[in-house]
Image (tube, coloured by chain):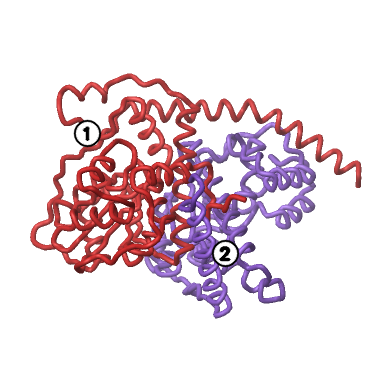
Chain colours: A purple, B red
């Protein structure tokens, strides 16, 4: 029910539970603070969008639930429970009545599992960022690392990462479904192509308004590196071989 | 050792879909060329995403027939094969395309499990590689799952066409958490399968949402016309036989489902927290 059947998610929740006690009575809901959650999937333009919202003076959207960011605030405030952390981070990061957080499923899972979602985030606005091309998402994410010497058995590596992204997307979709949330759905391609239009839509969805003269730094449009292009070609070729093998078995003499 | 499905099937019965299709028309390794030029269009759909409405809009406006020709359930495919003395799946695909091309356009609606035999038997490469793909989804997956649940419980999926069927819209259907969750999982898995397919084949479909289609069908039609490179001719026809079947029953089920989901989550939370606390304590003790 809480997404903890996934071992990576459970491990992460345990890691967070070793920093802060997950048990703690929740405080009162935040009055006069609009909560916005950017539901991110790795390799998408969610960080670009957060940057645009900061430069556009809409919201101070950051990865507030990343372990490294958490440790700093925990140490500075001497926090003991997860609930205390949530309250402290909302208090310190809210600007003009808006608290915005960018998090991937792993970072969101403790919030959901430990009760902070029910205490504070049920009424939040959810903005879900994905990329239209899953393969591009994988290549955008790990090609530099692969270039640095880990470029082996590419097909299996890419497929494994693609399945990890699919699992992350499925977790978000199941969460939205279970909670009856219809998020604002954005694609990385839209963010990169029409940043000002997207920022206006996000502001409107969040119940605020973008300044009439919106000053934004043009985001760097995602470009496929030659090495990534090469890896894409190899992947598609290997996928075709894999499909043919599956087909041969389906169509072959044995029962399908 | 069994070869793996290329995509994460997430429990979708891909092999069964292929087997059933092969029973009606067995696949053959070679495909023959199709005579004549035509624009190929495929609506890659998820269930209850407005595909019937979109198909009707496309038909009314001269974009082919847009029907589900590859549906194995029911006996339409079987009858077509018998009537036309079709020997194999290649013959079926070719005959369907030839018989349903209108004004140079062949348009088909494809659910994932209708598509997998075409894909894995090799006919995607032979006939659909250059098709214009329109991917139809719904932003509100719970609404979609409830709609599918209601359809499967009442046996009725579209606007009632006569008075005898009208009662299905009022029929009281209890909230069944497990069944609705199954529908939700199915939709999530189908979306994931389509997305993996598009990426793996290097395809960029036109993405259309049910919500856009409901709010502004003319704009969606215009978008599709631009995408396939066939400008709309004359006045756009927006009236179709399809109407929404959603009513207050859907809202009631939605509220009940979310409430039950939260109740179950609450029950499992204390158990989960106990396990996490114990692991965290162990980790601290080890340090």
Asked if B190 appears above or below B127 in the picture, the reply is above
Residue A128 shows which numbered tag? none
Establish if A31 lies above or below B196.
Answer: above
Across and down, in percent, residue A57 comes to 50, 63
Q: CA distance from mark 2 to mark 1?
A: 42 Å
Q: Which residue is painted at 77% across and 53% down in the image?
A: A76
The answer to which image quadrant residue A51 occupies is: bottom right
> Of A217 and B261, which appears nearest the observer?
B261
The quadrant where residue B207 appears:
bottom left
**Mark 2 highlights which residue?**
A138
Residue assigned mark 1: B159
Q: Which of A234 and A242 lies nearest the eye of the viewer? A: A242
Mark 2 vs mark 1: same chain?
A: no
Q: Residue at x 19, y 68 (%)?
A: B36
- State left or right for residue A116 relative to residue A135: right
Q: What is the x, y in percent for residue A243? A: 50, 59
Using the rendered image of the protein, determine whether residue A45 is visible from the camera's viewpoint.
Answer: no
- Can I make out residue B128 in this image? yes
In this view, the residue farthest toward the bottom is: A226
Is disc 1 placed on a helix, strand or loop? loop
Instruction: Describe the element under mark 2 as helix, strand or loop.
Output: helix
Query: What chain letter is assigned to the residue under label 1?
Result: B
């Amino acid at each position: 029910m809480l997404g903890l059947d996934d071992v990576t998610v459970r491990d992460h929740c345990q890691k967070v539970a070793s920093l802060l006690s997950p048990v703690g009575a929740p405080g009162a809901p935040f009055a006069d603070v609009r909560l916005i959650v950017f539901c991110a999937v790795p390799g998408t333009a969610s960080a670009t969008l957060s940057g645009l919202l900061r430069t556009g003076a809409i919201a101070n959207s950051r990865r507030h639930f990343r372990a490294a960011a958490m440790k700093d605030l925990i140490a500075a405030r001497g926090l003991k429970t997860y609930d205390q952390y949530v309250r402290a981070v909302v208090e310190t990061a809210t600007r003009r009545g808006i608290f915005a957080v960018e998090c991937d499923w792993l970072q969101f899972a403790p919030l959901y599992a430990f009760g902070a979602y029910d205490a504070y985030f049920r009424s939040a606005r959810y903005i879900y960022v994905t990329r239209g091309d899953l393969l591009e998402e994988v290549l955008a994410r790990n090609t530099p690392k692969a270039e640095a010497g880990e470029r082996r058995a590419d097909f299996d590596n890419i497929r494994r990462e693609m399945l990890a992204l699919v699992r992350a997307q499925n977790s978000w979709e199941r969460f939205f479904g279970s909670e009856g949330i219809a998020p604002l759905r954005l694609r990385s391609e839209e963010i990169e192509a029409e940043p000002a239009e997207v920022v206006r839509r996000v502001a409107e969805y969040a119940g605020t308004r973008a300044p009439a003269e919106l000053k934004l730094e043009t985001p760097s449009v995602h470009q496929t590196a030659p090495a990534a292009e090469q890896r894409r070609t190899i992947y598609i070729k290997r996928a075709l071989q894999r499909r043919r093998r599956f087909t041969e078995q389906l169509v072959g003499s044995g029962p399908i | 050792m069994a070869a793996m499905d290329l995509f994460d099937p997430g429990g979708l019965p891909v092999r069964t879909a292929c087997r059933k299709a092969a029973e009606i028309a067995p696949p053959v390794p070679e495909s023959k060329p199709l005579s004549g030029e035509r624009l190929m269009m495929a609506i890659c759909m998820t269930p209850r995403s407005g595909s019937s409405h979109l198909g009707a809009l496309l038909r009314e406006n001269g974009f082919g027939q847009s029907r589900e020709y590859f549906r194995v359930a029911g006996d339409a495919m079987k009858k077509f094969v018998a009537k036309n003395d079709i020997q194999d799946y290649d013959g079926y695909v070719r005959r369907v395309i030839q018989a349903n091309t209108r004004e140079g356009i062949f348009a088909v609606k494809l659910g994932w499990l209708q598509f997998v035999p075409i894909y894995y038997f090799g006919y995607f490469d032979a006939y659909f590689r250059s098709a214009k793909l329109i991917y139809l989804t719904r932003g509100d997956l719970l609404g979609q799952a409830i709609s599918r649940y209601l359809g499967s419980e009442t046996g009725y999926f579209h606007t009632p066409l006569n008075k005898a069927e009208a009662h299905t819209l009022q029929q009281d259907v209890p909230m069944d958490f497990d069944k609705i969750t199954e529908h939700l999982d199915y939709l999530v898995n189908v979306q994931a399968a389509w997305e993996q397919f598009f990426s793996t084949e290097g395809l960029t479909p036109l993405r259309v949402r049910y919500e856009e289609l409901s709010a502004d069908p003319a704009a969606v039609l215009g978008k599709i016309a631009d995408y396939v490179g066939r400008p709309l001719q004359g006045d756009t026809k927006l009236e179709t036989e399809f109407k929404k079947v959603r009513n207050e029953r859907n809202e009631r089920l939605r509220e009940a489902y979310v409430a039950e989901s939260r109740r179950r989550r609450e029950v499992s939370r204390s158990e989960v927290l106990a396990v996490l606390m114990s692991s965290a304590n162990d980790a601290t003790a080890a340090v």
